[in-house]
Structures are given as C-alpha cells and as structure tokens.
C-alpha cells in the first residue's frame, strides 16, 4: 500500500474493467488482511516510520501496521475510485474487531468514503453501528452458518433473520 505504482496499476485495471460491468460497487474486500506482513517488509516498515504522524502511530509499530488497511482504503478512494471513468462505490468487509491470532484488523469506518458499501459479517452490534452512521450496509451475520465447509443445515441458514434483530422487520 506504500508504493504509488500500486495505485497506478489499480487505476489502469479498474478503468478498463469498470465500464464493462454495470454494478454500482466495486468490492475491494479487506477482510483478514495479515497486517504482520507490513512488519516483515523493510520497505514498508521504513515508510511507516517516516509517515507515523499521518498514520497516528508514532512510537507504536503494531498500531502502524493496524493502520495500513485504513490507509490503503483512503488511498484507493482518492487515487483510484475518484478517477475512474465511470463512478463506482467501494465495497469492503467490515469486521467487529481484528483477530490477533490470525493477524488481521478491520478498516476504520471513519476513513471510508460516505458512499462505501459495508458488508458486516460478524455481529449485529457492528451492523447497528454501521446503520446508525447512515452507511449502506449488507448484513450477512450468521456466524459459521454461511461457511459451507462447516456443513450447515438448510434450516440453520434459513432461520437467520437479521432484520428481526436490527428492528427493520416489517412483517
């Protein structure tokens, strides 16, 4: 995320691809990014040290690494999404909290553009926060019921009713 060439490449690629697909959102993902990879790259660690004030992490390498995903999305908006020949919103996964054991951290909602589409997949509490901020939100919270490799039953998946828990059920 520290190299200008990354954003130049993504702008070129998405400028070619975006007009082909009519969907209003380009989903960039962002779940389970291994932030420890930033600590292991000497170029990135040097960059983080020289940009720690911008990242809000001076003196705390771990905080700098955790800030990199949010930094990436900020850069994607200003250097790529805003320059596409057809306007598209950014879609991202929005986790409750990071998973230190797996080495990833969620993006900071406050740095995501207002038109970003947030896919909340861990808890209804995060969905409530996202919706209270008037953000476009996909609620796909079902715990392990969505993971087919966990062999969920049809009934378990069918009975996930997010609107009942969020207060948006009109039936």
Image: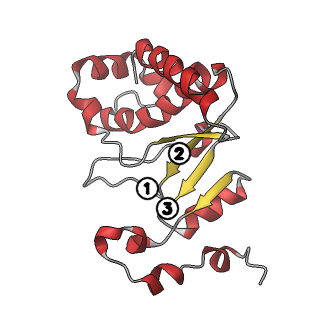
Q: Mark 3 or mark 1: which comes first in sequence?
A: 1
Please tell me whether mark 3 or mark 1 is closer to you in this view: 3
Position of the N terminus, as image quadrant, is top left
Q: Mark 1 or mark 2: which comes first in sequence?
A: 2
Label 1 environment density (alpha carbons within 10 Å; few <14, some 14–19, many ≥20):
few
Please state the horizontal and vertical placement of residue 76, each as a whole percent of the image: 54, 27
Secondary structure beneath dot 3 equals: loop
Q: Is residue 28 above or below residue 101?
A: above
Q: Which mark is residue 121?
A: 3
Of 99 and 29, which appears nearest the observer? 29
Of 130 and 163, which appears nearest the observer? 163
Please state the horizontal and vertical placement of residue 144, each as a whole percent of the image: 38, 72
Q: Which mark is residue 97?
A: 1
Q: Give the spatial CA distance, label 3 vs label 1.
A: 11 Å
- Pointers 3 and 1 in contact (CB under 8 A)? no
Horizontal side, residue 129 vs residue 44: left or right: right
Label 3 environment density (alpha carbons within 10 Å; few <14, some 14–19, many ≥20):
many
Residue at image position (59%, 79%) is 161
Please tell me whether mark 1 or mark 2 is closer to you in this view: 2
Q: Is residue 101 above or below residue 41?
A: below
Secondary structure beneath dot 2 equals: strand
Secondary structure beneath dot 1 equals: loop
């Amino acid at each position: 995320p520290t190299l200008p060439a990354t954003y130049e490449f993504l702008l070129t690629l998405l400028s070619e691809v975006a007009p082909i697909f009519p969907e209003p959102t380009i989903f960039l993902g962002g779940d389970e990014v291994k932030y420890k990879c930033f600590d292991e790259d000497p170029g990135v660690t040097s960059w983080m040290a020289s940009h720690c004030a911008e990242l809000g992490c001076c003196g705390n390498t771990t905080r700098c690494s955790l800030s990199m995903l949010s930094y990436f999305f900020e850069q994607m908006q200003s250097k790529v999404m805003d320059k596409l020949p057809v306007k598209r919103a950014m879609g991202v996964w929005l986790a409750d909290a990071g998973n230190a054991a797996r080495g990833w951290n969620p993006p900071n909602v406050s740095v995501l553009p207002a038109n970003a589409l947030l896919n909340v997949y861990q808890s209804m509490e995060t969905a409530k926060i996202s919706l209270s901020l008037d953000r476009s939100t996909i609620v796909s919270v079902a715990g392990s019921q969505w993971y087919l490799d966990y062999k969920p039953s049809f009934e378990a998946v069918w009975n996930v009713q997010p609107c009942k828990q969020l207060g948006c059920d009109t039936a």
